[in-house]
Image (spheres, helix red, strand yellow):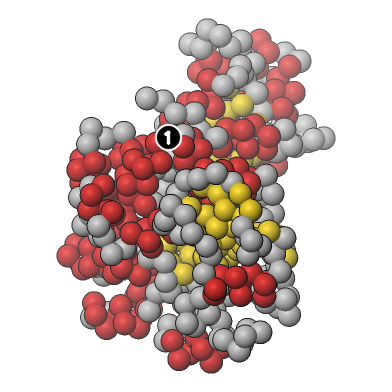
Amino acid sequence: MLIQRRLLGSLREALQTERLVLVSGPPRSGKTVFAEQLVRSGPGGLLLDARSPGIAAALAEPVLCLELLAAAMKTEAPVRLFGARLLVLDNADEEIARAAAAFVAATGPGKPLPPGAAASPEAQSAAAPLPEAAKRLRLVLVGARFPEEVPGRRLELGGLTLPEVGRGSRAGHWLRGGFPEAYGAASDQAALAWLRRYADSVAEERFARAGLPWAPGRTRALLSMLAEAHGAPLNENAAARSLGVSRPTIVRSVRALERAGLVSFLPALPEPAEAPGSAPAGGPGAAAATPAANAAAAPPTAAGKRLVRAPALYLRDSGLLHALLGIQGAEGLLGSARLAASWEGYAIEQCRAVLPAGVESARRRSQDGAGLELVLHRAGRPLLGAAIRWSRAGEPSRGARIAAREIGAESNWLVLPEGDERRLECGFSVAGLGRFLEIVAGL
């Protein structure tokens, strides 16, 4: 079953103004299939594996790059020689990203091709269109991660989202998560078994790349601790003591998993007095690990309560969370003590996947646990507050109502698994997750 990825629309829009677009995502998130969908979605596209010999060298020489395209496209009947307007490089790495950026810079507006551009037979056959072919060529790189210094529009491809699989598939999507191999597995048990193997292999590979001293057994122990911390700030000191390593080792390890796309952090909502960009960083080590330190740094609310300033940790994929918690299927999930935390993280990740440009996500939480699980804001101005609950009906808690009054968002919502949109007397509106994602996408 091939599911069309919604990111294609954002990518096509980006290509209207950008010559280099970088698409990154976690391992096994369907990046190669996405690249194939992009090339098939319109004429003039060519897909190459960036690991093929000579790709980086070809990008360093615009004429050589066009010759490479000419040779590849002779086998592509629907596309004429030098008719490519889009080159998609799958499995791109840092070297390819830097070479692609140099190619775009060398063939930008007003920059002629080097002397001798028409020396080769392929170039001579192209004659006049050759220089223009280099200037109009757009590049899309698809890979795991790219250097921050490389210019270009950046897009992220995560797992399959609820809008992509359809509202009717919510229960299975929540249980199995969005990794295509897990979502499409023959059974729930097969999906969760695959996710456990996936978590171990990706974590061990990322730790080894970062030079972190993790044995396989301790890798799984760390992953299990992160699953237990899901939805709350990570106590790095306690994790370090439990695993017999230093706190900096925990911080570096969690950052490696964050870069791999396995975990994410939801920061606290910036206070009005804070300058834009001064909110705590959304990663490990960004705030003190101990509750006492957090309370000392947190300003009081209007009700005299201290706010939690540390970011909350989430396993990005709900299926991965369930696999690490040892959940075996739908019955195990519904009977789990982590049911509410799982649903909260699932809803938040689905919302973050559809956020419009310029809209950021945060949370509002006091030391006693009251608050809003999700606040969407633009440059610190709250647009929407959401209390996320696993229930069929109900009202937002008193703490959620107080937090909503304090932040002054334009609208406040109670998000449930399903249900019709309606207005509550307390000033909140209620909606099922599917409808709520439509509202978020339209902000």
Q: Nearer the viewer, residue 381 or 195?
A: 381
Kindly tell me whether residue 27 is visible in this rendering.
Answer: no
Residue 177 % position (x, y): 36, 45
- Relative to residue 355, is residue 34 depicted above or below? above
Q: Quick one: label 1, few (<14), some, or many (20+) residues within 10 Å? A: few
* Quarter residue 111 falls in: top right
Q: Nearer the viewer, residue 8 or 117?
A: 8
Q: Residue at x 69, y 49 (%)?
A: 443
* Quarter residue 120 falls in: top right
Q: Quadrant of the N terminus?
A: top left
Residue 149 % position (x, y): 61, 56
Q: Amino acid at mark 1?
A: Gly
Farthest left residue in view:
217
- Relative to residue 346, is residue 60 depicted above or below? above
Residue 357 % position (x, y): 67, 49
Q: Residue at x 73, y 16 (%)?
A: 129
Q: Nearer the viewer, residue 76 or 408?
A: 408
- Relative to residue 252, is residue 49 depicted above or below? above
* Quarter residue 28 falls in: top left
- Relative to residue 73, is residue 112 depicted above or below? below
Residue 19 % position (x, y): 68, 36
Reading the image, the residue beneath label 1 is 168
Q: Residue at x 47, y 26 (%)?
A: 36
Classify residue 342 as left or right of residue 139: left
Q: Residue at x 22, y 53 (%)?
A: 332
Classify residue 328 as left or right of residue 314: left
Q: Nearer the viewer, residue 271 or 202?
A: 271
Kindly tell me whether residue 250 is visible in this rendering.
Answer: yes
